[in-house]
Image (cartoon, rainbow, N blue to C red):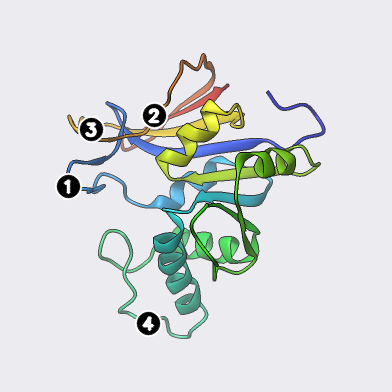
Amino acid sequence: MADNTSRKMISAMQVSLDGFIEDTEGKTDWVESWADAIQLIDDIDTFLLGGRMYPGYGEYWGMIHEDSKRIPPNPEVPSQADRLPSDSEIAYARVAAQTPHLVLSTTLDSVSWPAARIIRNLAELRAFKATPGKNTYVVGGAGLVATLMDAGLVDELRLIVHPIIVGHGKPLFNVTKKHPLELVQVQQEKKGQVILTYRI
């Protein structure tokens, strides 16, 4: 657990009731908006994501951010659900464009997202975590979250659990060891989702 002088790293993810973040075809059609997760975390001064997730993340949110500055917006800009971006997605894109991003990668040579930089290893990330600061939002993907949990770098998990059983797919927690969790908050949403907050 982080002390009072170091920043907290908080993962906020959306998951099916049986623990999957996508089905066997890579679909996530039970998730209305990926922007919902950021609303679970206050006082964010850094975003953290993995190198495999970054290219699609940067392209998608960058497109929404650039379009949001146009008046009127471009009606051809899609969102994950093949519809126009919602107000929360536009708000997410604007916040993300102004917030420093760390991309953990050993393969990427550069990142184009505003205020983003590459970090190469967990030692560098651990040194960053030890500096004073606000919360770091661990965006994902699932592989990064599992790696950070196994390394003892995640302080809290905030999960939006959707009322759907996928059966098979990509699991959220492909960790290599057990992680005891302390449940600190449960919140039920109108559409059947349950938001669970765990302290590690």
Q: Is residue 196 above or below residue 91?
A: above
Q: Position of residue 170 (x, y in %)?
A: 28, 37
18 relative to 108 in the view: left or right: left
Residue bearing the label numbered 4: 74
User: Mark 2 or mark 3, which is nearer the start of the sequence?
Assistant: 3
Q: Identify the residue at image location x=46%, y=18%.
A: 177
In the rendered image, which quarter is residue 175 located in?
Answer: top left
Give the distance between the C-alpha atoms of the residues marked 3 and 1, in whole angstroms. Answer: 16 Å
Please name the amino acid that badge 2 sits on: Phe
- Of mark 3 and mark 4, the one earlier in the sequence is 4
- Classify 61 as above or below 107: below
Mark 3–mark 2 Cα distance, whole angstroms, equals: 17 Å
Circle nearer the N terminus (2, 4): 4
Q: Looking at the picture, which amino acid does disc 1 mark? A: Glu
Say which mark, if any, is on residue 38.
Answer: none
* Picture residue at 52% right of the left edge, 52% below the top: 106
Residue 42 drawn above or below residue 84: above
The image's mark for residue 173 is 2
Disc 1 to disc 2: CB gap under 8 Å: no
Say what secondary structure mark 2 lies in: loop
- Name the residue type under label 3: Ile
Of 64 and 85, the residue lying toward us: 64
- Real-space Cα distance between discs 4 and 1? 29 Å
> Which residue was labeled with disc 1?
25
Tag 3–tag 4 contact (CB < 8 Å): no
Q: Position of residue 183 (x, y in %)?
A: 52, 17
